[in-house]
Image (cartoon, grey):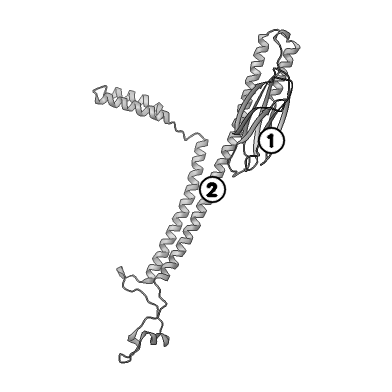
Amino acid sequence: MRLSATTLLVTALGWISAATAHTIQLKSHSRECFHETLHRDDKMTVSFQVGDREFGGSGNLEVDFWVEDPGRNRQYFKQAISTEDYSFTAHMDGKYIYCFSNEGWTSNSKEVSFNVHGIVYVPESEYKQDPLDAEVRRLSDALAQVKDEQSYIVLRERVHRNTAESTNARVKWWSLFQLAVLIGEGIFQVWWLKRFFESSTCVPNPSRFPILAPITSENICALGYKERWELRALPFGCNVSTITLLTAIISVISTLAAIGLGFFTVWAVKRVRRQWREGKITFNLGRVKRAVLLRRRYRGREIGGGDRSEEGDARENAETRPLLG
């Protein structure tokens, strides 16, 4: 069976439009515009997804998108969107312009991946309906959709990877900050407690002078007898030096515990990420709720005198285990 030239042209245009996929870097406070020349009753579809290649970006993946007709009138306008799939039919001949704008956002540059599909309008009187032609065009549209979905999945994976890496970096720096704070706190505690149990004032000690000599504390200070006051009578027979030593030991232990907790947090986050990627961690709240309701139903039968045999228990386990995964 031979296909007409018009049919081949339509099919070729469909394949070309399916292959029209672009990726641009949209810098901060900038816009990018493209145009397509269409004829009356031609159909055009623009689908795009916004991503971010930069590590540790602001996380704002929104742009402004609009389409202008040949008369420079905006026939479609959307603000603050990250993905869109817009289709329209040309109502006049000329250039149709579609733009991506990052002018209203102060974040870093963004990556916009977009696809353009076009269907040339051909009157039915110009060619005969051919089932093979219709099937080829249907397969072409399906392949275009598959390619769009694949591009979307790749871009979403990149966005999620950047988010996970940014989260890991924040956890790391937060752990280092906690470690620095705890070390500083331990040093301050040792210094403060040591200073708290010391006194640089003059303390009278009349035992060093004759009892008959009326020497006051001022006279003792004038003679150079400056002594540090030490608290001798503490519980368990501890003195000041012992308390200082115990405080230092406790501070070191708390610091080491904070370091271990920080490393454990980073290790746990990485382990959960790895298991999530491998599909070992799954949780479906709907299945858990159904399992709980099913167990309650069997418990109601048991309380109401229902089937309490081993066969009933086996049937209950067989029905609830698949729901719990």
> Is 4 left or right of 246, judged from the image as shown?
right
**In-front residue for pair 248/66:** 66
- Where is residue 24? Give x, y as percent: 69, 35
Horizontal relation, residue 38 to residue 313: left or right? right
Marks 2 and 1, Cα distance to the nearest angstrom? Answer: 29 Å
**Residue holding disc 2:** 170
- Where the C terminus falls, by quadrant? top left
Q: Looking at the image, is 130 positioned above or below residue 87?
A: above
Give the residue number, with chain letter if any, for mark 1: 24
Task: Give the residue displayed 66% in from the left and 16% down from the top.
Answer: 137
Count residues near mark 1 (Cα–Cα under 10 Å), then give few for <14, some for 14-19, many for 20+: few
- Determine whether, in the image, residue 6 is placed left or right of residue 285: right
Q: Nearer the viewer, residue 314 or 116?
A: 116
Residue 207 seen in render: yes
- Circles 2 and 1, Cβ within 8 Å, touching? The answer is no
Q: Is residue 1 visible?
A: no
Which quadrant of the structure image shows residue 228? Answer: bottom left
The N terminus, quarter of image: top right
Under circle 1, the secondary element is: strand
As drawn, the residue found furthest toward the left would be 305
Q: Position of residue 279 (x, y in %)?
A: 50, 33
Q: Position of residue 318 (x, y in %)?
A: 36, 24
Q: Residue at x 39, y 81 (%)?
A: 202
| Amino acid marked by disc 1 | Ile
Query: Where is residue 86, by image quadrant?
Result: top right
